[in-house]
Amino acid sequence: MPLSADRKKQYRTLGHGLKPVVTVAGNGLSETVITELNRALDDHELIKVKLVIADRELRAKVIADMSKRVKSEIVQELALIHIRRCRRRGEGSSLSEPANEKKQAKNI
């Protein structure tokens, strides 16, 4: 399910203060990088990814490949920085559900 504009704005605000946890450079998306992206998303749900690729076309291909191989959504794209989100499995988290939705769910 795609993110609403309000939800994306919330995640962009949260992602602003994050430091990149994964850097993708000239070698592209190796299996090690994919593994690290998935681990970081499992641990943090919202991550910042730095793409150190000067060529725009190559960067666009890497982003497309990342979207296919990593189960996450792009929250924001800014030049060389991406903020990605993955809904946590199981318990949920404060990022997945805003506080008022959690309260409503408990009252039902």
Image (cartoon, rainbow, N blue to C red):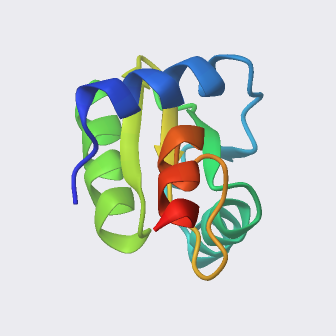
Q: Residue at x 34, y 47 (%)?
A: 63
Q: Is residue 87 visible?
A: no
Q: In which quadrant of the rendered view does residue 78 lie?
A: top left
Relative placement, left or right, of 84 versus 3 is: right
Pick the residue in front: 96 or 18: 96
Q: Residue at x 57, y 18 (%)?
A: 13
Q: Residue furthest front?
A: 107
Q: In which quadrant of the rendered view does residue 52 lie?
A: top right
Q: Residue at x 58, y 69 (%)?
A: 88
Q: Residue at x 57, y 79 (%)?
A: 89
Tell me: residue 28, above or below residue 54.
below
Q: The C terminus is located in which quarter?
A: bottom left
The percent coordinates of residue 59 (x first, y second) are 35, 37
Q: The N terminus is located in which quarter?
A: bottom left
The percent coordinates of residue 93 (x first, y second) are 66, 58
Tell me: residue 69, above or below residue 46.
below
Relative placement, left or right, of 28 versus 35 is: left
The percent coordinates of residue 81 (x first, y second) are 52, 26
Tell me: residue 29, above or below residue 56.
below
Q: Is residue 62 visible?
A: yes
Tell me: residue 43, above or below residue 83.
below
What is the count of numbered marks? 0
Q: In which quadrant of the rendered view does residue 57 lie?
A: top left
Relative placement, left or right, of 81 versus 41 is: left
Pick the residue in front: 38 or 5: 5
The percent coordinates of residue 26 (x first, y second) are 54, 44
